[in-house]
Structures are given as structure tokens and as C-alpha cells.
Image (cartoon, rainbow, N blue to C red):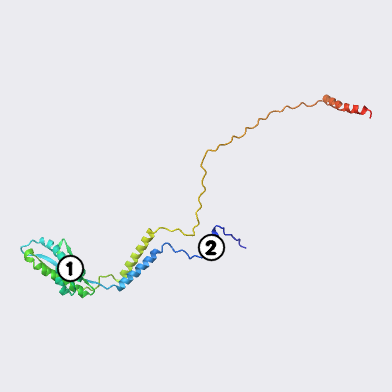
Amino acid sequence: MRPRFRIPSVVKPARLRLRGRRPPVPVWWPLPACAALGLTAGAAYGALAEPEYASTTYLIAVAEKDSEPAATLGFAQAYGRLATSTSTLAYAQGNAGVSTRQLGSRVQTETSPESPMIGITGTAGRPGDAADIANAVADALRLKANGQSENTGVKLVRFSQAVKAPEPVSPSLPLSIAVGTSAGALVGGLILLVRPRRTPAYESPVLPAPASEPATARATTPAPAPTPVTARATAPAPTKATTATTTARAKKPRKKQENQPS
């Protein structure tokens, strides 16, 4: 028979409490939960978001005969800022087919301090509309700049025309899923780092260590001194004469008692 081990009484209450409970949730649960949430959000955005197309046209500033070529850099920067102004967009809205407010959110410009070139990008839900927006704004800016060329000495010439974009610039479905999952995992990791650690309820309490007695100098009682061994006087051994005398003395009273009359 196998020996039976009895559970100590200290362990029994904790074991009985754990029988009615579910297994504890792991402390790293925010990481997979946030990653799954990010994956779902990325997939939903990639599947439901409307694709967006972009087309870009370029204008270049050219100096006239009596103007300095270095002046074209400054005018290119200035005309790049005027491309998104209200007056330019209002002139371009007829050819673009959208309102001025919509043009302001769908047009972007870029310039370079090293070259007198202006890039105008139009965005829309269809590739043809994006190209029309970019070309309409470029034509409006070119007409406005060339109307003042006699005073500025600089003209804007079309360098390239915007064409239909073959692919959308919005994130694709796989890219949206990857970005969403990565963002969710990052948020879950930050939650694990920030939140305080919790102690389990079934952890046995730690008993305090017994307080050590202060190291004080204890008074020690002196050990009793050993008693000196003294030499006892020993009586001399009796001789034969002394023994005979002692015996005679002991017999005399008995004789007197025998001679007395009864």
C-alpha cells in the first residue's frame, strides 16, 4: 500500500478556496487582445475605405530676356504658395468640376529651393478626376502668373501634364492589416509596462522573521571555587596491649552484676 500523506492544516483553506474559482487570467493578456483588435481595425479600414488616386503636374519658372535667371527661384517659391490660394482655386473650379472648398482639401503643392519648379498634385476617388484637378489648378496658376510677366519678368511654362494614375495611393488591404496589427501590439506592450503588477489572492502570507535579541553583555555568575581537600588525621592502629585492656574493662561490670544477690 502507498503511504498516505496528510495535507497540513495551513494549506487546506487555500486549496478549498481555489476549488470554486476559475484558472487565473495570464498577466500578458493585453498584448494579444490589442494585437487582435488592431488586426480587425486594419482589415476593416482596408476593406471599407474608398481608394484614393493622385496625379501630379509640374510647372517651371522661366526668366525673360531682360530678367536675371536667379530671380526664378524666388518667384517659383512665391507661385507655389499662390497655387492653393482662394483666388486661384476659384478660377480653377470650373475646369475641375468641384467646389473651391473641395479643391482646397484635394490640392497639394511642392517646391524646391534648388530648382524653379512647382509640383501640383490633385487627389480624388477616381484617377481621371485627380488628373483633371491637378491640370485645372496648374492652368489657373499659369494664367495668373503670365498675366503679370511684364512686371515680374518671369513666366510659368508647363513642364509635364498630369495623367491618370494606374494604382491608388491609399493603403492596400495587406498593408492595412499589417499596420493595424503592429499598432495594436505596440499599445498592448505599453499597457503591460505601465500598469502595476498584481499579487495573486491565493499567495500564502509571509511570516515575519523572529526579532533577534539585542546583543547585550550578559552578567555571568562566577563558577564556585573548588573546595580544598584537607588531609584528615588518622588514628593510630590499636596495639595488642590496648585491646586486652579494653576487653578486661568491658567484662568487669558483668561480674559485679552476677555476684549481687537476687
**Disc 1 crowd, CA 10 A, few/some/many (<14, 14-19, 20+):** many
Name the residue at 84% across, 25% down. Answer: 245
Q: Position of residue 191 (x, y in %)?
A: 37, 61
Nearest to the eye among marks 1 and 2: give it: 2
Q: Position of residue 179 (x, y in %)?
A: 32, 67
Res. 180 mark: none
Could you tell whether 238 is left or right of 93 in the image? Answer: right
Name the residue at 17% across, 68% down. Answer: 120
Q: Does residue 141 sit above or below 190 in this rendering?
A: below
Residue closest to the eye, 44 or 20: 20
**Quarter where residue 42 is shown:** bottom left
Answer yes or no: do the residues labelled 1 and 2 have beta carbons within 8 Å? no
**Quarter where residue 236 is shown:** top right
Name the residue at 30% across, 71% down. Answer: 46
- The amino acid sitting under disc 2 is Leu
Q: Which residue is mark 2?
A: 16
Q: Position of residue 242 (x, y in %)?
A: 82, 25
Q: Secondary structure at mark 2?
A: helix
Could you tell whether 228 is left or right of 187 in the image? Answer: right
Q: Which residue is mark 1?
A: 120
Q: Position of residue 240 (x, y in %)?
A: 83, 25
- Visible in this render: residue 183? yes
Tell me the quadrant of the picture where the N terminus can be found.
bottom right
Residue closest to the eye, 179 or 78: 78
Residue closest to the eye, 17 or 31: 17
